[in-house]
Image (spheres, helix red, strand yellow):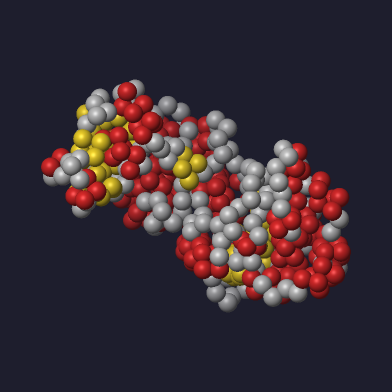
Amino acid sequence: MTYHPKSEFIAIMMERGFLADCTDYQGLDDAFSRGVVPAYIGYDATAKSLHVGHLMNIMMLRWLQKCGHKPITLMGGGTTKVGDPSFRSDERPLLDDAAIQSNIDGLEKVFAKYLSYGDADNDAMMLNNAEWLDGLNYLSFLRDIGRHFSINRMLSFESVKSRLDREQSLSFLEFNYMILQAYDFLELNRRYGCLLQMGGSDQWGNIVNGIDLTRRVLDHEIYGLTTPLLTTSDGRKMGKSQGGAIWLNDEMLSSYEFWQFWRNTTDADTGKFLKIFTELPVAECDRLGALEGSEINAAKIILANEVTTLLHGADAAAAAEATAREVFERGGIGDDLPTLTLSAADLGDGMSIVQVIVKAGLADSGKAAKRLISENGAKLNDEPLTNAGLMIDAAALAAPIKLSAGKKRHALVQLG
């Protein structure tokens, strides 16, 4: 990309690898140079926590605020009732109002770690699109908003087209989603002067719809900006691990497991992830990312500490590093390992070690646990575990036991 930005925010986004596309670089850059720009990202409340796959866009909101602009986190209290069909093979399960609100409460905890909310010019705002969507009059909405949308054009969007090409059903409910998201941008511009919607590259069609609708209805110039789809160097989608999603809420994933996820970054991804997920200077990120051999491990520890400090605090990062050193360097048991607590009732006359491995989150299924044991990948108290028929009873847990899957994944099991 040859564009040379004037504004601090666009310059940082380009330099650190956040930008995939923008509807108008020059126009947006000029807006950032003129004054405070309110910008939003929308989050549907489909789970109680966001995961690492959302972290790139959260960091973008954080940089926006650090550059003096106004982040808006838009909770999808209304759109969650419909469900975003983008690039999905089936319809999302519908949630009731109580479940949606419970999920929103969980998401708010994450944003509070990264953004400063308040009443100042560049303080973040937390909004909910149920504010304007819940009270819509259907006929008025069709007449005033629906007439601006072409079915032909909507069918051409890749997120819809890919679903139809596979001959998978797309309900009329879901088809309305892109109209509602476009309407969000219109309302945010009308009510709060919002000039920019940001999101992942899979949201490009929805963002462009909102810009087009706002121009038609209000004759206002607004902008869209997307981040690239982030994959690891081996082609996997960012944010997934063997054990599932890497959640940002600590009640769903411990700070140690979060730290360990970043410590396990591949050598090739370390420099890129330092630029995107930390606030270290770009030159330092490049220096650390260029290290080789055993030295790159020090860079990965810096990455893990920086990212964990932003989310969980410096004390949690330090505790996670100390635990990791004790586990990996001295073969001990750290204070911060994921812990499975089993009651005497859980154990009964005994629980197979295969079940214990699954319950501890070290394998997805009994079959996977047995394979782990047969391939000599499992350890019990740092000794090879070879007997898949071993039974664990209350006596075996008189002291906590340590289970390991490979060299990097560990858990404690104790009697509670």
Which of the 4 quarters of the picture holds residue 383? top left
Q: Is residue 249 above or below residue 97?
A: above
Relative horizontal placement of residue 3, taking residue 315 as reference (left or right): right
The quadrant of the picture occupied by the N terminus is: top right
Residue found at x 71% / y 46%: 169
* Residue 356 in picture, x, y percent from top left: 28, 40
Residue found at x 19% / y 50%: 344
- The answer to whether one can see residue 236 in this image is yes
Relative horizontal placement of residue 246, taking residue 79 as reference (left or right): left
* Residue 315 in picture, x, y percent from top left: 33, 56
State the residue lying farthest toward the top.
375
Relative horizontal placement of residue 408, taking residue 86 as reference (left or right): left
Which of the 4 quarters of the picture holds residue 121? bottom right
Residue found at x 82% / y 64%: 146
- The answer to whether one can see residue 1 in this image is no
Q: Is residue 281 above or below residue 182?
A: above
